[in-house]
Amino acid sequence: MGKVKILSTLQNKAAQKKSIHKNSSTVFLGIVNPEKGIDTEVSLLNHFLVKRNISDVIATIEYRDLSGKIYDSFNIKMNEPRSYAFRLGNHIKKEFIGSIYLYFQSNENLAVPFCAVMSVIKTKESVCGVHTYGRRLEKNEMGTAIELHKTIETGWTLRDSESIRSFAALHGGQFKLSLDIKIECSNESGIIKTAKIYRILEPFGTLIIFPQDIIEGLIEHLGQAKGHAKIFINGLSGIFPRMICGNYKPESKNSDDLTKINEIQFTHTNFDFSQISQPNAISNYGYYNQPDLPDGYGIVYPVQTKSDITIGKSKYIPDTLHQFKVKPMQQLEVHSKNINLPSRFIAAAVGIWGKENLESECSTGTYIEDYLKISSHWHWGLLKPGFEKGNSSVSIIYNKFNQNQNLKRKLKFFIYSEDCLLLEEEIILTESQIIKAMDFLPKKLPNKSLWYVLIGDILEDLNVFSTFYPADKAGFAEHAF
């Protein structure tokens, strides 16, 4: 990984403006158990049409088991300005765990090879969602710098105890993979336990990793505190190796059957930026932004850095899982004293939904000044999944930096359902604020997914999140596209 170089945040955003991709894809973990009320919903706003005016997109949806074998597949022409949702439970009426692959194809430029899609898993005690993380590589990406043969993935918080287990999943692509894997689990004292495994991943198969099955004495190692897992994977081909990672409460002790769980929370991994060459940001400070959450705190994932960094009044100790206090809708300055900030300094917003519930975790990162150099006119994301009742909010947080202009501006706020455009409102922003989105809508809504859109002349200085509050369950927050 030491030879791998990636673009800075500014370079990456600029490159996206010029890239040409007529194919796009994503893949998610899918779980369903009708008897336990477990289901998975994948949804998206038809941004191809609504944002780019592309009406000839064909979506192919594939449900595959863990071995990669297709269970069901179908095509949909995406030619309507609305949200689209695919619920695993509508197609599979029994216990099932596997993957949900989505492929998008057009005669026009889709701009990016990864698409703006969300996946949500509901259980008896939780509803959690995550945006696109892994995908297959497209033909024009094969053999380029994006095709990695090995990776080091971080950003996986371990909460293992007698009642909680951690997990992560890697999705394969068109090639059979022979994987050498090492897992490092560090506790709050920085002591590391490691283990190595070797696995064969069949084409389009899914590998699920359970640290308690691999690291002997993991619970005792963590000692009722949070830890962190780092995954070294060698033998990759044809995929972007981002993983889903998180924690769950099994129905029975020590069970690795994810179709029999009471609760689950997850986010996605990130590259270990200690091992990847990346340019620094253009300035020595940025912001950590906490969205609307019932309670919580912030985390910076372990990374080796030469920067002397503080988050608010909290000094970051390199290569540690760093926890800091922050209130909902609070903004903390992230400052590097000696050199500019790393382009990517990965943090997470943690929500506390109740003493008996798992904490939610949204991998969000640091908002750096580079974002202001590329104009932005759109933010959008999932407002509410269709298979669960609840309330939703949209957090809009200003990132002022050294700008002295008047922050007041007009934004258009839209809500789309699976049927049509439900709402168009004008929002006047003068400061960071929460939009109580459900207040705009009728109290009785159909059980269909809702997506929001914010449009304006200047959006590049806004950090936008949505938070879903289900009734009597743990919910989640996710940042906007």
Image: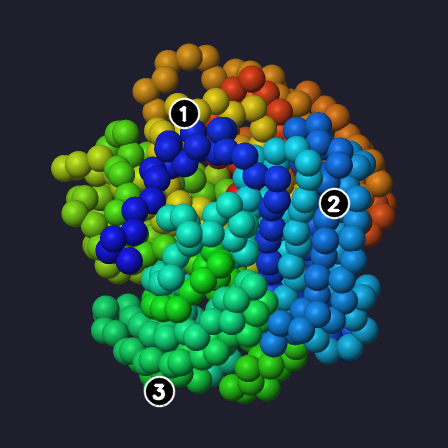
Which numbered disc covers residue 58? 2
The correct choice, above or below, for 465 with respect to 264 in the image is above
Q: Nearer the viewer, residue 435 or 29?
A: 29
Task: Please state which amino acid type lies under the numbered disc 3.
Answer: Glu
The correct choice, above or below, for 121 with respect to 69 in the image is above
Q: Which residue is mark 1?
A: 372
Q: Quadrant of residue 97?
A: bottom right
Task: Please state which amino acid type lies under the numbered disc 1.
Answer: Leu
Cα–Cα span, label 3 and label 1 = 47 Å
Q: Could you tell which of marks 2 and 3 lies nearer the N-terminus? A: 2
Circle 2 packing at 10 Å, graded few (<14), some (14-19), many (20+), is: some
Q: Is residue 293 left or right of residue 225?
A: right
Q: Residue furthest left?
A: 338
Cα–Cα span, label 2 and label 3 = 47 Å
Q: Which residue is pictured at 32% across the width and 80% down the height?
A: 195
The scheme the figure's colours follow is rainbow
Cα–Cα span, label 1 and label 2 = 34 Å
Which numbered disc covers residue 216? 3
State the quadrant of the C terminus. top right
Image position, residue 340 (x, y; %): 22, 35
Q: From this viewpoint, is residue 1 visible?
A: yes
